[in-house]
Amino acid sequence: MNKKMRFLAVPALALGAVAMAGSPALAADGTYSSTLGQLNGTTGTGTVTVDVAGDQATVNLQVSGLAETFMDGPYPHVQHVHGNAMGTCPVPADDADGNGIISTTEAAGRYGDILTTLSTSGDTTPAAALNLELGGQGGSYTIERTITIDEAQQKSLEEGTSVVVVHGLDPATAGVSEDVFNSPSDLDPELPLGATSPALCGTLVMDQMAAMPEGGADTGVATESSSTGMIALGGGLVLAAAAGGTYAVRRRAAHNA
Ligand SMILES: [Cu+2]
């Protein structure tokens, strides 16, 4: 009887750890972010964070200084999470046809196909990729919304191949002639090439402080938002299960902060 109870004690402890952490973390869970880089003569800037929990992703995308107007209206900037390729942004050498614009098709070898449309409302699937009404409007805007992401998107995040791309070049800075800018888009011949080509681009990288909380003792883990704190706690418990003493260190750090 005594022996049997000791045998049961180990799995009981393991279950306790899982219960304390809440639902077991899925592989893609975490906070991802990127500072977007400029392509095709773009002078604007952008940052994005994506908080992932299961199939829910809270996206916060902020851009400023992009092209403001298009045909007398607010310039529509379609934007997506691409993935399942190299997980990188294109370089000038990717301008295969040499017309001066790296098109979406020319960049696809780097950042891959559209997995999620970062629309301002409604549909977030690839079907909404070129819906101009659902794109960012004007030169500066913020999109903050929680969306459902499919398994392909989750897998790409987990593998580090997810790349946020904001499309829509500024004719004043793109560095090409009006004829080239307005030539038929590789994505939709009804649209100008310049309007659908990538303007800002950045690979989503998981926040390492949240992923590896043992490095965060002096860097304010406890002052972060509750969602990040939960992730840090989950990570701490995983470490505790793997390597005995770590949990005590983590608890002390959290208590002091
Ligand atoms: Cu795109």
Image (spheres, helix red, strand yellow):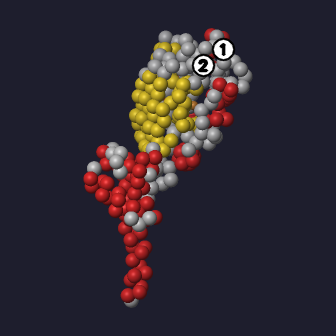
Task: Estimate how packed mark 1 is, as few (under 14), some (14 to 19) or many (20 or more) residues with alpha carbons within 10 Å.
Answer: some
Residue 140 appears left or right of 257: right
Discs 2, 1 touching: Cβ within 8 Å:
yes
Q: x, y (%) of residue 24?
A: 44, 59
Residue 154 seen: yes
| Residue at which label 1 appears | 180
The N terminus sits in image quarter = bottom left
Residue 12's place in the image compared with 146, above or below, is below
Identified by mark 2, the residue type is Gly
Residue 4's place in the image compared with 176, above or below, is below
Query: What residue lies at 56% left-to-right and 14% top-to-bottom?
Result: 173
Q: Nearer the viewer, residue 194 or 255?
A: 255
Q: x, y (%) of residue 230?
A: 36, 52
Residue 75's place in the image compared with 146, above or below, is above
What is the CA distance from the residue labelled 2 to the residue labelled 1?
8 Å
Q: Nearer the viewer, residue 116 or 201?
A: 201
Q: Which mark is residue 194?
A: 2
Query: What residue lies at 51% left-to-right and 19% top-to-bottom?
Result: 43
> Quarter of the picture for ligand 1?
top right
Query: What residue lies at 37% left-to-right and 62% top-to-bottom?
Result: 247
Q: Nearer the viewer, residue 201 or 54?
A: 201
Identified by mark 1, the residue type is Val
Q: x, y (%) of residue 157?
A: 53, 45
Q: Earlier in the sequence, mark 2 or mark 1?
A: 1
Task: Estimate how packed mark 2 is, as few (under 14), some (14 to 19) or many (20 or more) residues with alpha carbons within 10 Å.
Answer: many
Query: What residue lies at 54% left-to-right and 37% top-to-bottom?
Result: 203
